[in-house]
Image: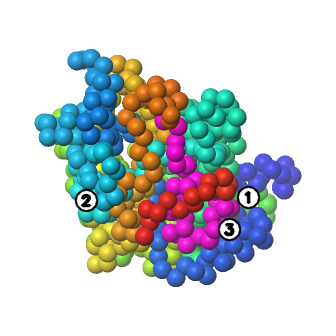
């Protein structure tokens, strides 16, 4: 093998992802922008992406409850006594939970899914906002333009893999090389004492965190996973003769072995540094999440999403020990592809989301005795929304959807964007009530990036389609 081949570079890139390392800067221009961003990063800020994998049904997550909207909602979603996916009314047993935005919309009222009571409380407290009808867009378009194909639309709409990739990177799966969370990390990594901890996933390999230069550090569980058996007796050998560390991280003359060992050594060093920070000062003041209550059974159980966010809180707790100023995190919860059993399954999934978000808000409120909520912003994302019409017991793949933003810097208790008319056949209905988005993912991300400290030029580098939209900041961040 030629040791400057593309295969070798791909291999090294994969190893760097596992090690949390970074590759050589790919252009002087990016390095210059990164330095400029770093110069302004004197405080700590973190962005946390909570991805609802599968495509959450937004029509039952945030819904209009004024009489006209509610009548149409019940008409369309009450498909049958056995298969209805309509929720009970405000005030009914298990009914939807009213929210009152600080900027009222004339003639309209709104509510959240019954499982979202903790988010209702955070909304009322001003630390959660709703962004309505956001989705993948290349540029603004009308329904007529969409039907005529006269304006560029996101490719492969309604495909899980491709729309997850579009949400996370602005490109379809086959073309995606870097996610916008990773591109944020590229620009801010030089402000960190250790760039390896700029982008951290606690939900596996995430396109969202793949940078051009920065590689995501992947956690699994409560702390950074070590390579086992590097010390102590191994296969009957005495501890003093353990050969494993020398095998995986020793010095070799062969270029391929040498590079592999160097990456492994960096992984070992990164694991030791991160574990020390998380389990030292970082773990102090980060309580274990209480069990959540399954709304279908009433049984208390561990919430895997809350455990992911506990790990995020511990990493944030170790920020000073690691010399970190800017971080981007990724957590995820699956099970939102609700073609069947939507009432039961979505109730349980949203209960986990609300419980985990409320837990994280509380953890940030008193992290090592410091209120970190103004420095940490969490936002939700998903493959797409769903159809308004039901297939009897669930819904099918849609497009635009409603999402939540949480944090002390969020201008909460409000609904941003354009809440669509409730019904079918309106000027945003691309079929079966699936919504043509009125706000793009690029605008969503650009608003967060501006709060994060990026300039307009840097934002344009991170979000390639943002120049097609007249509004680049949606105003939900203080």
Label 1: how many Cα within 10 Å (few below 14, some 14–19, many 20+): some
Closer to the observer: label 1 or label 3?
Answer: 3
The residue that disc 1 covers is: 257
Q: Which mark is residue 457?
A: 3
Among numbered discs 1 and 2, the one appearing first in the sequence: 2
| Callout 2 crowding tier (Cα within 10 Å): few <14, some 14–19, many ≥20 | some
Tell whether 332 sits left or right of 150: left
Q: Are marks 3 and 2 in contact (CB under 8 Å)?
A: no
Residue at x-position 55% and y-position 49%:
440
Tell me whether the residue at label 1 lies in contact with that at label 3, contact meaning CB atoms closer than 8 angstroms. no
Residues in magenta?
Answer: 435-463
Using the numbered discs, state the Cα–Cα distance from disc 3 to disc 2 in whole angstroms: 35 Å
Magenta span includes 453: yes
Q: Position of residue 289 (x, y in %)?
A: 26, 57
Residue furthest right in the image: 2
In the image, taking residue 477 as reference, residue 163 lies left or right, namely right
Q: Main secondary structure of the magenta part?
A: helix
Q: Going 43% across and 62% down the picture, which residue do you hit?
A: 476
Of the image marks 3 and 2, the number of the one nearer the N terminus: 2
Residue at the image point whose x is 45% and y is 79% from the top: 320
Of residues 37 and 363, the one drawn nearer to the viewer in this rendering: 37
Question: Could you give the CA–CA distance between mark 1 and mark 2, rounded to whole angstroms?
Answer: 57 Å
Q: CA distance from mark 1 to mark 3?
A: 41 Å
Q: Which residue is mark 2?
A: 124
The picture places residue 24, in percent across and down from the top left corner, at 74, 66
Tag 3 secondary structure: helix
Tell me: residue 3, above or below residue 454: above
Sequence-wise, the earlier of marks 1 and 3 is 1
Up the image or down, 14 lies above or below 158; here it is below
Q: Which residue is more in the foreground, 427 or 465? A: 427
Quick one: quadrant of the C terminus? bottom left
Give the image location of residue 352, x and y in percent. 30, 46
């Amino acid at each position: 093998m030629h040791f400057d081949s593309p295969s070798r570079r791909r291999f090294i890139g994969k190893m760097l992802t596992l090690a949390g390392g970074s590759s050589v800067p790919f252009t002087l221009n990016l390095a210059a922008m990164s330095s400029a961003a770093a110069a302004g990063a004197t405080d700590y800020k973190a962005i946390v992406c909570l991805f609802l994998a599968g495509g959450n049904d937004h029509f039952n997550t945030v819904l209009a409850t004024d009489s006209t909207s509610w009548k149409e909602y019940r008409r369309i979603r009450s498909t049958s006594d056995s298969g209805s996916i309509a929720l009970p009314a405000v005030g009914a047993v298990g009914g939807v939970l009213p929210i009152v935005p600080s900027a009222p919309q004339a003639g309209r009222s709104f509510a959240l899914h019954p499982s979202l009571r903790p988010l209702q409380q955070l909304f009322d407290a001003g630390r959660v906002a709703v962004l309505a009808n956001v989705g993948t867009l290349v540029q603004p378009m009308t329904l007529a333009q969409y039907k005529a194909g006269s304006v560029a639309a996101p490719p492969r709409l309604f495909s899980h893999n491709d729309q997850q990739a579009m949400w996370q990177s602005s490109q379809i799966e086959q073309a995606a090389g870097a996610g916008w969370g990773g591109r944020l990390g590229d620009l801010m990594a030089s402000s960190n004492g250790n760039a390896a901890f700029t982008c951290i996933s606690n939900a596996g390999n995430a396109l969202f965190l793949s940078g051009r230069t920065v590689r995501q550090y992947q956690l699994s569980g409560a702390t950074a996973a070590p390579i086992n058996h590097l010390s102590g007796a191994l296969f009957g050998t005495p501890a003093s003769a353990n050969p494993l560390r020398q095998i995986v991280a020793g010095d070799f003359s062969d270029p391929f072995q040498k590079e592999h060992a160097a990456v492994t050594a960096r992984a070992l060093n990164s694991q030791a540094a991160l574990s020390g920070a998380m389990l030292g000062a970082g773990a102090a003041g980060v309580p274990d999440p209480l069990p959540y209550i399954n709304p279908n059974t009433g049984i208390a159980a561990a919430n895997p999403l809350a455990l992911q966010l506990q790990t995020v809180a511990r990493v944030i707790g170790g920020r000073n020990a690691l010399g970190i100023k800017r971080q981007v995190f990724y957590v995820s919860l699956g099970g939102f592809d609700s073609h069947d059993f939507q009432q039961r399954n979505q109730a349980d999934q949203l209960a986990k989301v609300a419980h985990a978000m409320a837990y994280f808000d509380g953890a940030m409120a008193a992290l090592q005795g410091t209120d970190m909520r103004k420095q940490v912003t969490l936002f939700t994302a998903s493959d797409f929304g769903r159809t308004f019409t039901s297939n009897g017991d669930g819904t099918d793949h849609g497009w635009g959807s409603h999402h939540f933003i949480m944090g002390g810097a969020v201008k909460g208790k409000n609904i941003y964007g354009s809440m669509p008319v409730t019904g079918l056949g309106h000027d945003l209905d691309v079929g079966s009530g699936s919504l043509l988005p009125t706000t793009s993912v690029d605008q969503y991300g650009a608003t967060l990036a501006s709060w994060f400290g990026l300039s307009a030029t840097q934002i344009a580098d991170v979000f390639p389609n943002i120049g097609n939209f007249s509004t680049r900041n949606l105003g939900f961040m203080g």
